[in-house]
Image (spheres, rainbow, N blue to C red):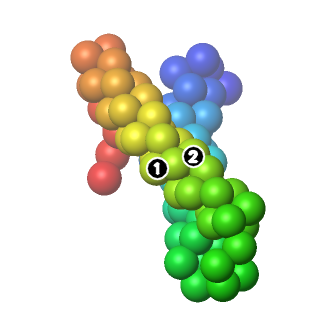
Amino acid sequence: MTFAQFVGNGTTGVIGVLNTIVIPVIFALAFLIFIWGVLNHFFLHGGEDGSREEGRQFILWGVLGMVVLFSVWGIINMLLSTLGIAPGV
């Protein structure tokens, strides 16, 4: 196996695993944290201020996590396409 085969492209090798398995799982976790925060803030625990504040924190961190993930994912895909290892769709 050569280094190019090991690294792969958008659907094979290490890059393929990251693009098709790892990144979507991380996106899903960030989205679930956001949803958990929304549920805590608006629907669960009535009017308890502590629970509402905790829910607000989960919403904030969920949104920030998704923004950072989208940004890093875009930068990495631009770098890969610049290097000629364009991810396959």
Q: Amino acid at mark 1?
A: Val
Image position, residue 50 (x, y; %): 73, 62
Asked if residue 73 can be seen in this view, the reply is: no
Count every numbered label the image shows and give the total.
2
Q: Residue 75 versus residue 6: which sits nearer the camera?
A: 75
Asked if residue 34 can be seen in this view, the reply is: yes
Would residue 18 appear left or right of 87 to someone viewing this image?
Answer: right
Mark on residue 63?
1
Q: Amino acid at mark 2?
A: Trp
Q: SS class of the residue under badge 1?
A: helix
Mark on residue 44?
none
Above or below — where is 82 with respect to 22?
Answer: above
Badge 2: residue crowd in 10 Å (few <14, some 14–19, many ≥20): some
Identify the residue at horizontal 62%, vertical 28% (top origin): 6
Occupied quadrant, residue 25: bottom right
Would residue 80 appear left or right of 13 to someone viewing this image?
Answer: left
According to the image, label 2 marks what residue? 61
Image position, residue 46 (x, y; %): 66, 84
Would residue 58 appear left or right of 8 to someone viewing this image?
Answer: right
Q: Residue 15 versus residue 31: which sits nearer the camera?
A: 31
Identify the residue at horizontal 69%, vertical 58% (top origin): 54
Occupied quadrant, residue 80: top left
Image position, residue 64 (x, y; %): 48, 41
Image position, residue 1 (x, y; %): 67, 26
The Cα atoms of the two marked residues, 1 and 2, are separated by 5 Å
Q: Residue 38 versus residue 51: which sits nearer the camera?
A: 51
Above or below — where is 82 with respect to 8?
Answer: above
Q: SS class of the residue under badge 2?
A: helix
Above or below — where is 64 with respect to 26?
Answer: above
Badge 1: residue crowd in 10 Å (few <14, some 14–19, many ≥20): some
Identify the residue at horizontal 43%, vertical 29% (top origin): 72
Q: Is the residue under label 2 in contact with that under label 1 (CB below 8 Å)?
A: yes
